[in-house]
Image (tube, helix red, strand yellow):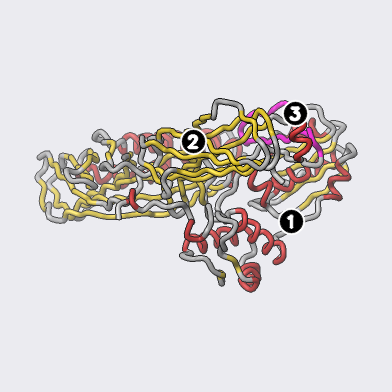
Amino acid sequence: MSICDLSILFDKDSHCYLPGEPVAGKVVVKVHKDCKNVHLDLSREWRTHGKGNRTSGDKGSMSIPKLQNWRSGRTYEYAFKFKAPDGPPTYHGHYLNVDWYLTVTAKILWGVTRLLSGQRSHPNCETEFLLRPRKRPLTIKCHETTKDSTQLYVLAGAILILIGIAVLLFQIWLDRTRLIDLAWGLVPFVIGIIVLSLNLENALSQLQLGPVLVSVAPGKDEFTLQGMFTFQPRRSIVLERVSIILSIRESVTKGYESNAKTHTHVLFTKKMDDTTLGKLVSKQPFETSLLLAFPEILPPTFKEDDNQIIWRVKFEVVPRDWLSWRRDIVIQVHN
Amino acid sequence: MPLHDRISLPYAHLNLRCNPFGSLSREEKNKLIVLRIELSPYIERLREPGFAVQFLREGARNKTTHLLAIQKHFPGAPYIRLYEGQPAPQFPQSPILFIDWFHALPRVERAGLLRRKASFAIVSHLSHEWEFRRAQLDYDLVKLPVYTVEQLTHQINRRINWAKRNPDIQVPTLSAGSIARLRSRFDDDTAIINYLYEVFEDLVEVGTVEI
């Protein structure tokens, strides 16, 4: 039989609190064996659980200051009170859950007590409490208008390809044709191809559109965001559409190093288009924005090691008879 | 309903604290994972220097859990986890060493280590058979098998009971037929765990789960 049974009772049956609200309750101890000099330690932390590797944070400790002497057969109660933390709020998703835990441990001075009880570890008890998100609108951390570095990447890709080709030819000319010798040229060549192919469509698109600047800001109404486009076309063009696509997803990683695997679950996705823009005149600055509403129920950004909730906005500019321009931005959204 | 009004204790509708088939911490794995093979023959041989046992398999077959299960029989013996791309630690002098991710150590250092007068219990993604021979060690290469139906039943029930919230209230269970069907459908135990994760995410009430 264990030395004691511990339980935690909250003042609210729901266990549910807002950030900053007092969290109160009591620890109840049913003692089965006499013990002296017991130190009760209370700690709280948030932990993730679900598909991804476990992470935790914001561990805080409180203790009942006086050492306790307990008599067998008796029940003792100890009140506690602390301020509910600011966050992260409790979240129950598909691959990711974030929960807050309160743990009480009775740290017993061992010696004779331990010898008699046969107990190897300190008795403890753990229970969840729920941290609500604040009842205020989500705030979006505005990204400054982000310049597109596509042309730099294309240039870098082209340079790497040229370097790769030059080194390969040089090695062949020196009759060094082992794979390890050719690798000096192959590696930059392959990297250059990859960098170029990832950025080529945008670079070619900007031959007509010019550099495209995009940004995200909160909309005027609650639970809306505004995606803004600014560019100055180099030639007169007809725009089929501009679009913003908001997607929110859980991304968790299970396992480590070569065993690591990432699982993604889309929580929400929505697209807004404007197909009415029509003809744009060469060298005339052009600005437009799209407003996108999203449901109140969506969770804020969460980013800890192997567990994330990611808000991403994808921008598209689709001219008629020419290549499209696309850009992804990750935004930070908080209560 | 706004998010702040919808929160309840996780998986309370199933009388669970969490999805039983989610990720486990190292401590939880040590408690919950059902061992796939009998380890006592290796434990006895490791007590004498000059023997190496390697748990070998790509992918998740709980190799580390088996390694640590052996280590429990050698109190004080060091367990060293290596990481690719990071400098190797100093290996303490010990009659037995437990080394995880042995393949992350450069070959020259592996050879030096295996020349010690000691025994070795190793987890690796590569076979080190020729290195054991070169060091003149007796050795066993152990490929951990998939669970039998019986072991799988034990593993599934153990996970579900561990995740139980209130010990006096029922939790979802899987029928014996369902477990047998899972075994025949999936070659890999990780695939079964991943499948059951999704099944339990979709459960709305306690009952017998039929696959």
- Looking at the rendered image, the disc whose residue lies closer to the viewer, 3 or 2, is 2
Tag 1 near tag 2, CB within 8 Å: no
Assign the C terminus of chain A to one quadrant of the image. Answer: top left
Residue behind mark 3: B91
Foreground pick, A85 / A8? A8
Kindly identify which chain the residue marked by label 3 belongs to. B
Separation (CA) of disc 3 from disc 2: 49 Å
At label 3, the amino acid type is Phe
Q: Residue A16, position in %: x, y?
A: 40, 46
Q: Is residue B14 above or below residue A196?
A: below
Indicate the chain on which mark 2 is placed: A
Residue A136 lies in what quarter of the image?
top left
- Marker disc for residue A79: 2
Q: Nearer the viewer, mark 1 or mark 2?
A: 2
- Tell me where residue A123 appears, x and y as whole percent: 64, 40
Magenta segment boundaries in residue numbering: B74-91
| Secondary-structure class at tag 2 | strand
Which amino acid type is marked by label 1?
Arg
Examine the structure image and report whether residue B88 is included in the region drawn in magenta: yes
Q: Disc 3 on helix, strand or loop?
A: loop
Mark 1 and mark 3 in contact? Answer it, CB < 8 Å: no
Could you say which quadrant of the image residue B149 lies in?
Answer: bottom right
Residue appearing at x 63%, y 41% in the figure: A74
Residue at x 48%, y 36% (from the top left corner): A188
Main secondary structure of the magenta stretch: loop
Left or right of A189 on screen, residue B163: right
How far apart marks 1 and 2 lie (CA) works out to 47 Å
What distance separates the C-alpha of mark 1 from that of mark 3? 29 Å
Q: Which mark is residue B36?
A: 1
